Image: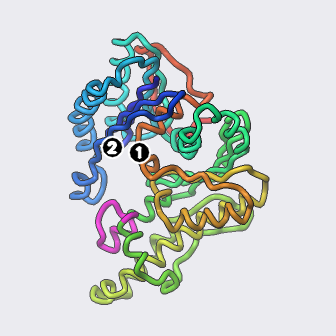
Amino acid sequence: MILAIESSCDETAVALFDPARGITGEWIHSQIALHGRYGGVVPDLATREHLRNLGPLLERVRETGGFDGISRVAVTHGPGLAGCLAIGVAAAKSLALAWRVPLVGVNHLRGHVFSPFIGVHAEAPTEFEARLDALLPHLGLVVSGGNTLLFTLDRDRRITVVSSTKDDAAGEALDKGAKLLGLGYPGGPLIEKRAALGNREAYAFPRGIGPRADLDFSFSGLKTSLRYQLEKMSPPEVEARLNDLCASYQQAVVDALVRKTTLALERERFSSLGLSGGVANNQTLRGALGRVAATDGIPLLAAQPKHTGDNAGMIAFAAWIDPSVQPVEPLAELGIAPGLTL
């Protein structure tokens, strides 16, 4: 049984994973309402909230008998906000030391990489290894507020990053676009809600595609284009056309993600396509990539909605499935992982 703690940004989360059964419990405290007042995450407030809420979450785990049979403690050790990560790491070290069990540090992005396979494992834990083998090699897309990247996962579960963003992440572009439109935080879901009522072809926003041979993403030009468009419009006109603006802006993000993913699929044969990260919960993106996967004759493995954002379930699962995760002594130094380490 693995107990995992996630505290990289503004979600305090704990989860339990049993290889024989899957994720047996997940507890999370969201800070969205707090940070929404400021239009984005305030690091000092986020750290304070982790300190305030991690203890009560662990107490809820204990009350359910979740502390029985723990053989490993896993914790996110980066990338993320340093103060937030420190709270989770300190708690994980304390628990591992008290229980005399190994401690493992999990890279947050590697958690996203493996999160689409959580559902595959849950369907048939005893058959998972055989099913996983049939799904590899795998092409995955991680799309979040801080990261946008394409990667491959080979039969030995080795990760190779094939492209990333040259500037803004897709989620960052959506959040900043929402701020320009006066929608608030978090921006992605608010844009998606408005976009469902609008015309996605109303405005010709750039796709940031670049040369065909280039798989990297770019979203800073899209954000600038929206700002220029809004400067041409009066406040009443913006309000009247808000749904169309959201639909067109969101479609530009989706098109860029889909086109680069399609190009990567054309270059090599894969057995499955994955989608994970906070923006993976966007239904327009899910639908578009589902059609791409169907055209290629492979399954789309999209992370379950509860595992798209920051969560401890994916950290626990990665601690089990990721061959790069190695246990250390409870008092060992766990440095912050700066990115997707390979």
Task: Find residue 11 and name its label.
Answer: 2
Report whether 124 appears left or right of 89.
right
| One can see residue 74 in this view | yes
The residues colored magenta run: 176-189
Q: Residue at x 36, y 43 (%)?
A: 9
Residue bearing mark 1: 310
Residue 260 drawn at (x, y percent): 66, 62
Q: Amino acid at mark 2?
A: Glu
Mark 2 neighbour class, 10 Å CA radius: few under 14, some 14 to 19, many 20 or more: many
Please tell me which of labels 1 and 2 falls first in the chain: 2
Q: Quadrant of the C terminus?
A: top right
Residue 93 forms part of the magenta stretch: no
Residue 180 forms part of the magenta stretch: yes
Q: Are marks 1 and 2 in contact (CB under 8 Å)?
A: yes
Q: Residue at x 51, y 70 (%)?
A: 221
Residue 103 drawn at (x, y percent): 45, 19
What is the count of numbered marks? Answer: 2
SS for callout 2: strand
Q: Residue at x 35, y 25 (%)?
A: 66
Report whether 154 appears left or right of 121.
right
| Scheme by which the image is coloured | rainbow
- Taking 133 as reference, is 199 above or below it? below
Quarter location, residue 60: top left
Residue 269 drawn at (x, y percent): 78, 53
